[in-house]
Amino acid sequence: AQSVTQLDSQVPVFEEAPVELRCNYSSSVSVYLFWYVQYPNQGLQLLLKYLSGSTLVKGINGFEAEFNKSQTSFHLRKPSVHISDTAEYFCAVSFLTSYGKLTFGQGTILTVHP
Amino acid sequence: GAVVSQHPSWVICKSGTSVKIECRSLDFQATTMFWYRQFPKQSLMLMATSNEGSKATYEQGVEKDKFLINHASLTLSTLTVTSAHPEDSSFYICSAPQAAGSGGTDTQYFGPGTRLTVL
């Protein structure tokens, strides 16, 4: 069975500081990995995804994530955050090419302070 | 990008009544849609896969008679919470994959969610 663990439920950070949101997964088969962002009262928006190839994936809004197979991790990073990055971030995995059946982590609330 | 809408965005109902939630893909066709449930401060959990023209596939532990799913067209899936009770109060989110076409990969688009409160 697949599972996803986001190690931090809340991450406070000051504006322009770097941030890392951690995600670990467990699966007996190969997976596809995703990071989504959810702003208040809005749906989920895809930040980036790892399907294959380069383990460093770049997404929208300056975010990037690195797939580490040996550590079964897919941590999300941004070198300098903005106030507008305040939102909830979800890590998700799927082993189906259609990405339909996503297993989500618990979510990490990123709060950027001025 | 593609847009998936949900209606209503929020609903309050009395215990024992039924509530219908619509999920629409606005500018693409989706033979499959997915319904998720999100409890406060918890993650999204897949409830069922909605299949156009056939029965929905429910995840283990989800009561199919409680959560009726109908995928009547390529752009519309509905979730009906029957005889709703306070424990059914939650945030319901749908998603639809848009096929990328030959050589590409699908992209999953999520609706904005529907907050259901059962009194």
Image: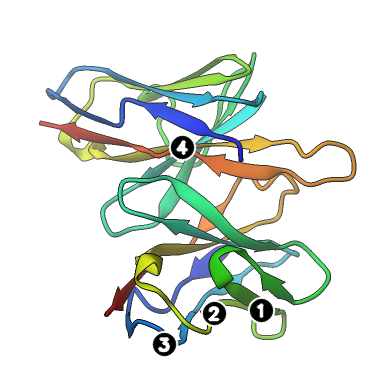
Q: In the picture, residue A94 is in which quadrant?
A: bottom right
Give the residue at mark 4: B111
The answer to whether marks 4 and 1 mark residues whose Cβ atoms lie closer than 8 Å is no
Type of residue at label 3?
Ala
In front of the other: B74 or B46? B74
Secondary element under disc 2, as helix, strand or loop, is: strand
Q: Nearer the viewer, mark 2 or mark 3?
A: 3
**Residue type pointed to by label 1:** Glu
Q: Are marks 1 and 2 in contact (CB under 8 Å)?
A: yes
Please say if B44 is above or below A69: above
Q: Quadrant of the C terminus of chain B?
A: top left
Q: How is the image coloured?
A: rainbow
Mark 2 lies on residue: A77
Query: Label 3: chain?
Result: A
Q: CA distance from mark 4 to mark 3?
A: 31 Å
Q: Secondary structure at mark 3?
A: loop
- Distance, label 4 to label 1, CA atoms, is 27 Å
Q: Alpha carbon of mark 2 to alpha carbon of mark 4: how far?
A: 26 Å
Q: Residues within 10 Å of mark 4 (few under 14, many from 20)?
A: many
Q: Residues within 10 Å of mark 2 (few under 14, many from 20)?
A: some
Q: Amino acid at mark 2?
A: Arg
Give the residue at mark 3: A17
Q: In this view of the protein, which residue sits in the foreground, B57 or B23?
A: B23
Q: Are marks 1 and 2 on the same chain?
A: yes
What residue appears at the point 75 percent right and 77 percent down from the top-left corner?
A: A55
The residues tagged by marks 1 and 3 sit, at their Cα atoms, a distance apart of 19 Å
Task: Judge from the rendering whether residue B105 lies leftward or rightward of residue B33; answer left or right.
Answer: right
In this view, the mark in front (1 or 2): 2
Q: Is residue A41 left or right of residue B33?
A: left
Does label 2 or label 3 sit earlier along the sequence?
Answer: 3
Which residue is label 1 attached to? A66
